[in-house]
Amino acid sequence: MKSSRSFELKPHEEALATVRQAILPNSPKFMIYIVWLLIPFFFLFPLFRLGIGGVAVFFGLVISGGLLLLRQYIRWSGTHLILTDKRVVDIEQRGFFDRVVTEAPYTQIDEASYRIKGFWATVLRYGSVRFDLSGSAADIQFDHINRPARIHNLVNDLREEHRKEDLAL
C-alpha cells in the first residue's frame, strides 16, 4: 500500500497524517518566478523587432522562468512530513533530482518542539516542528506547516504510547 509517490508503508503500518508546507510562506518565490515568466510578454514586440538576439532573449527568459517556477512547485509539492503509527518520515524535495528522506521511530525521538515566529506566522498559525533524535542521528525539522501545535501534540501522544509499550515488554 502506497502513501505517497516516494514512500512505502511497512506491513501493518497505518498513515495517521500527511503534512505539507503552507503555501503562503512560499508565495514570494512563486510570485517572483511568475513575474519572471510574464515580463518578456510585455516586451514581446520590441524584443522581436531586434531580430534573432531579441527572440533569443525572449525565449531564454520564458524558458528559464518556466523552469524556475516548475522547480519551486516540485520542491513545495514533494516536501512533506508523514506520521504513521510507528514512525515519523520527513521527505524533503530539494530540486528536480534531489530528495532527502529521514525517518525515525517514536522511541528514538527524545524531544519534540514547535515554534511560531513572526507576526504573519502568528496571525496565520504556521510554524516549524522539530524532533531531536537520540544518538548520532540527524534531527528532523519541518518548516512552514499549518498548526504545528497539533502535530507536536500528536507526536508526543504517540511517543508516550510507544514508551508505555516498551515498558510493558
Image (cartoon, rainbow, N blue to C red):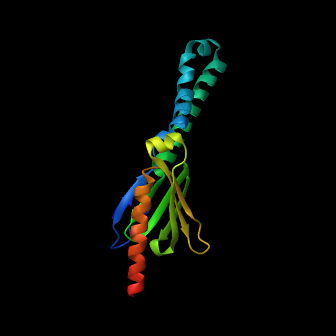
Q: Is residue 56 above or below residue 109?
A: above
Q: Would residue 138 be found to the left or right of residue 19 on screen? A: right
Residue name at image x 37 percent, y 69 percent: 85
**Can residue 11 be seen at all in this image of the molecule?**
yes
Placement of the N terminus among the 4 image quadrants:
bottom left
Residue name at image x 51 percent, y 47 percent: 75
**Can residue 8 be seen at all in this image of the molecule?**
no
Could you tell me residue 126's position as x and y percent? 47, 47
Residue, far bottom: 169
Residue name at image x 46 percent, y 63 percent: 89
From the viewer's side, name the closer residue of 10 and 63: 10
Q: Is residue 19 above or below residue 158?
A: above
Could you tell me residue 5's position as x and y percent? 41, 56
Could you tell me residue 37's position as x and y percent? 54, 28
From the viewer's side, name the closer residue of 131 and 72: 131
Q: Quadrant of residue 58?
A: top right
